[in-house]
Image: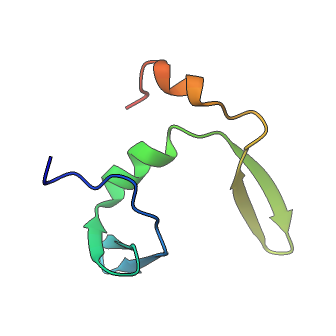
Amino acid sequence: MENELKGAEIKTVYAHYENVVVSDGEHAYFISPEELIKILSEFEFIKERKKTRTWIHVNIDDWRIEKFNKPRTY
C-alpha cells in the first residue's frame, strides 16, 4: 500500500511543538503524542535512577514478539 511506511530505519526523533518528528534520514514524518503513547504502551520498562532524574529503558530481556498477539491496552 502506498500510504504505509514499512521497514524504514528510524534515524532521529525530536519534539516539534506539540508533536514528535520521526526521520529516516531522507524524509521526516510527524507523529502525535497519542500515537507515540500507543507504541510505548506495548513495551515493559526498567527504571534507573541517576542523580536527579529517573530514566526508563525497554526491558529487552523479558520482551518477546509473542506479546503482540495479546489484546492491546489502548
- Give percent across and percent down for residue 62: 75, 33
- Give percent across and percent down for residue 56: 70, 57
Kindly identify the residue that appears in the image at 40 percent across and 80 percent down: 25
Kindly identify the residue that appears in the image at 86 percent across and 74 percent down: 51
Using residue 7 as the reference point, say whether residue 53 is left or right of it. right
- Give percent across and percent down for residue 5: 28, 56
- In depth, the one of 24 and 36 nearer the eye is 24
**Occupied quadrant, residue 18:** bottom left
Is the residue 12 above or below the residue 3 in the image?
A: below
Query: How was this image coloured?
Result: rainbow
Q: Residue furthest left?
A: 2
**Occupied quadrant, residue 14:** bottom left
Kindly identify the residue that appears in the image at 42 percent across and 49 percent down: 37
- In depth, the one of 47 and 64 nearer the eye is 64
Using residue 14 as the reference point, say whether residue 59 is left or right of it. right
Kindly identify the residue that appears in the image at 73 percent across and 63 percent down: 55
- In depth, the one of 46 and 12 nearer the eye is 12
